[in-house]
Image (cartoon, rainbow, N blue to C red):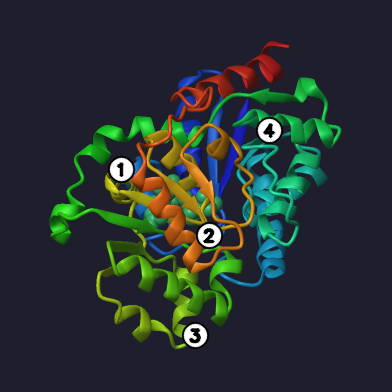
Amino acid sequence: MKILTVAGARPNFIKIAPLHRAFNACGDFVSRTVHTGQHSDFSMSGIFFRQLGLPGPDHFLGIGAGTQTEQIAKIMLAFERTIKKEKPDLIVVVGDVNSSFACALVAAKLHIPIAHVEAGLRCGDRKMPEEINRILIDAMADVHFATESAAVGNLLNENIDLDRIHLVGNVMIDSLLYYMPDIERITLLQTLGITQPYLLLTMHRPQNVDSKPALEKLLDLINALASTRLVIFPVHPRTLNNINHFNLLTAFNNIKNLRLLVPAGYFEFVHLTKNAVLVLTDSGGVQEETTFLRIPCITLRKETERPVTVLEGTNHLAGDYSVKKVVALIDGILSKPLKDTRIPSGWDGNTATRITAILREKYINS
Ligand code: UDP
């Protein structure tokens, strides 16, 4: 049975690595990968293939940047050609990026079964590009692999049959555990000469970085945070483009106690996370990694599609944040002993193996 697994953007590479390994380890599957090229520069793509030991993709579609519609349309056209060449028996898509949605739509039209890894996550905000992708992918998928129980509830509310839904855990945590020995060897902090406590910041969602007022608010926040602690900020290319576009780079560069970095490699970023006092983010994956690593996290968004990270983990939602509110939240979190948190069920490093067993049972043994 031939499985074609799709990746396009940074978080996807981290999710497909354990899947590709588990599919290959199971003698019944031939595993092929497609990289759409939604992210294609070295810091957002190449370094992940290298660090994760992923063989170069079997198909690279070279899509690049564009509006969402351009990206989706280009991916669909290119992926249809790939499918015709590869003739896969199953398509696996992960997460919620445009590549996952576009490829799932092509597969659905060609009547190829789709498995969605990280199914059922919902934040309730359809203006968030990923939310529409999530809903539509799940409407088309034949098998849904969920990371947390809230996702199962969301899928049932959308009339997905229970026998298609599997609560299997989190492939991101498979990667975190598998590569931990490599992460432990990273010495970036030493190289950067950083010995003092620091806050780690990542920011790339459109609502936080696409307008001048949003970036000015971020600037104010960093100014306030950096008055008491070092802030380390590996800057996503989208964020950097907008900082440049709105002529704010000098203002960011002038903040003392702020270390702006290029996007970090995966090993380097987890090393920075593990050693941080607290992480501020709008990333999905980072909310999960901080929960697993038991590092306090503040999510600078109004809602999260990953509620288990707040209910059981270390995540705190800042809502429609103000500088004052975030500073008070940090002081509150750090002035008390860390809250007693749990690692969500199934976030144990074996999710890709469970997914493989379920697919085998469904498509080969039955
Ligand atoms: N990450 C990374 N380098 C960075 C920032 C994040 O390797 O500079 C990793 C992080 O550890 C996590 C993933 O990228 O595994 C999250 O991706 P991103 O925030 O781009 O996407 P999201 O999870 O929000 O979809």
Q: Which residue is mark 2?
A: 37
Sort mark 4 into few (<14), some (14-19) or many (20+) by Cα contacts within 10 Å. Answer: some
Q: For the point 45% across and 30% down, which residue is it?
A: 341
Badge 3 or badge 4: first in the primary sequence? 4
Q: Amino acid at mark 4?
A: Ala
In the image: residue 334, left or right of residue 158: left
Mark 1 vs 4, N-terminal side: 4
State which quarter of the image contains the N terminus.
top right
Q: Which mark is residue 274?
A: 1
Please give the name of the residue rendered at 35% of the width and 53% of the height, measured from the top-left corner: 47
Compute the Cα span from label 4 to label 2: 31 Å
Q: Amino acid at mark 2?
A: Gly
Q: CA distance from mark 2 to mark 3?
A: 24 Å
- Tag 3, which secondary structure? helix
Is label 2 or label 1 in front?
1
Q: Position of residue 105 (x, y in %)?
A: 76, 49
The kind of residue on which mark 3 rests is His
- Look at mark 3 in the image and give the residue it sits on: 245
Residue highlighted by disc 4: 150
